[in-house]
Image (tube, rainbow, N blue to C red):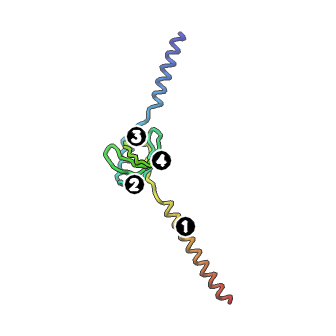
Amino acid sequence: MCKTIIVWLVIFALGLGNALAQTKATSPEKQAEFKKHVVEWGTNKQVNVKLNSGEKLSGRIADIQNEFFVLQSVSKEGKVISREIHYNGLNKLSGKTNAGKVAGYTTLGVLAGVGVVFLVIFGVFLANES
């Protein structure tokens, strides 16, 4: 009796471990959405990718195919790495933008303009004092 219980527990544990280790495939609708974004962006677009396995990657789109696209990045050793990213293995895909840069330059321009106006007003005030 005890052996039977132990055998069933081992079978259950192995089956559960195998079920948890499997990654979920991306739905066909989601794959079509990923393909649409990749084609719209085209090559040389900087992207962030999260795979169904949980791995996060970053790089540029180097090539676009029907079943996958090629992501290129530079390793810590300075070597160019090309990796095929299959649409059915994607969990998340986002394009990198330079919105932060634009906002930063806009803020810098506004502050420079305010500074110039302040200097002109200060100069006029000093000219009227004398």
Badge 1 or badge 4: first in the primary sequence = 4
Residue corresponding to mark 1? 107
Dot 1 and dot 4 residues touching (CB under 8 Å):
no
Q: Residues within 10 Å of mark 2 (few under 14, many from 20)?
A: some
Q: Position of residue 69 (x, y in %)?
A: 35, 46
Instruction: Identify the residue shown where x is 38% and y is 40%.
Output: 88
Q: Nearer the viewer, mark 3 or mark 4?
A: 4
The image's mark for residue 89 is 3
Q: How many labels sit on residues? A: 4
Could you tell me how far apart the alpha carbons at marks 3 and 2 are, in whole angstroms? Answer: 20 Å
Q: Residues within 10 Å of mark 4 (few under 14, many from 20)?
A: few
Badge 3 or badge 2: first in the primary sequence = 2
Residue 21 visible in the displayed image = yes
Q: Position of residue 92 (x, y in %)?
A: 44, 45
Residue corresponding to mark 4? 76
Q: Nearer the viewer, mark 2 or mark 4?
A: 4
Instruction: Identify the residue shown where x is 47% and y is 40%.
Output: 54
Q: Nearer the viewer, mark 3 or mark 2?
A: 2
The image's mark for residue 45 is 2
Q: Secondary structure at mark 2?
A: loop
Q: Amino acid at mark 4?
A: Lys
Q: Is residue 99 left or right of residue 125?
A: left
Q: Position of residue 36 (x, y in %)?
A: 35, 50
Residue furthest to the bottom in view is: 130
